[in-house]
Amino acid sequence: MLNTWVVVPTCLPIVLRRCHACASGRFRANGKFRVNANHKLIDAWLLALCTACGETAKLTVLERRNVRSVRPELLDRLHDNDPVLTAELLRDPVVRRRNRIALDWDDAWRLDTGGSAHLDREVADVSVRFAARIPVRPVRLIAEGFGLSRAEIERLIKEGNLVSAVRLSGKPTGDFGFTLKR
């Protein structure tokens, strides 16, 4: 029987970027946007607060764009400080690259295993889905889902009792499956 696990974000990740005021490297996006229009051009930023000193950093979303080229729905979401848009923009690789930021997903996700029925089976086939692109090591997910140590999971991989079509040592952010034999 195939079990399905889902990796679900619980909150916004920490934005990793150096603070110019206190040299801290951690910011929390508060879901607020700043939009500025100058004649036919528009700029928009996602605001993030330093976790140490509270200084505000502006993460560029739109820069010197013609107002007519921006979808009206996007403008409405920016003006409404849409929290879903905040999450979408933080996961957008173009926005992260433009602002030279990285994300820290520690303590910002949970694993939904759908119960503990899989724990007592001799062979467990599991499909792992990601509700968002969250870089988590499969070894960590499997250890958490089965209540085992990561060292025990590594041992099962070496013995050939834990197999998958994807490499279990990386950080895939896409769906994958595995089979565990006890």
Image: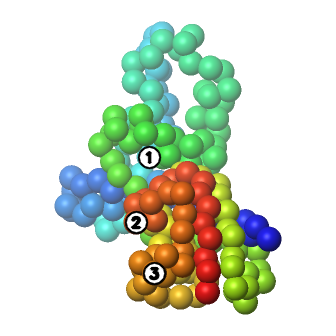
- Mark 3 against mark 2, which lies toward the viewer? 3
* Residue 124 x %, y %: 69, 76
Colouring scheme, one of rainbow, by chain, secondary structure, one colour: rainbow
Please tell me which of labels 3 and 1 falls first in the chain: 1
Q: Are marks 3 and 2 in contact (CB under 8 Å)?
A: no
Q: Amino acid at mark 2?
A: Ser
Residue at the location (48% across, 40% down)?
92
Furthest residue toward front: 160
Can you say which quadrant of the picture contains the C terminus? bottom right
* Residue 85 x %, y %: 60, 42
SS for callout 3 = helix
- Mark 3 against mark 1, which lies toward the viewer? 3
Q: Which numbered dot is residue 159?
A: 3
Q: Amino acid at mark 3?
A: Glu
Residue at the location (62% across, 80% down)?
181
When the figure is inspected, residue 158 is found, relative to residue 33, above or below; the finding is: below
Q: Which numbered dot is residue 169?
A: 2
Q: Is residue 140 left or right of residue 26?
A: right
Q: Residues within 10 Å of mark 3 (few under 14, many from 20)?
A: few
Q: Which numbered dot is residue 47?
A: 1
Q: Residues within 10 Å of mark 2 (few under 14, many from 20)?
A: few
* Residue 72 x %, y %: 66, 21
Residue at the location (61% across, 77% down)?
180
Q: Amino acid at mark 1?
A: Leu
* Residue 116 x %, y %: 74, 84
Can you say which quadrant of the picture contains the N terminus? bottom right
Identify the image quadrant of residue 99.
top left
Identify the image quadrant of residue 81.
top right
When the figure is inspected, residue 65 is found, relative to residue 35, above or below; the finding is: above
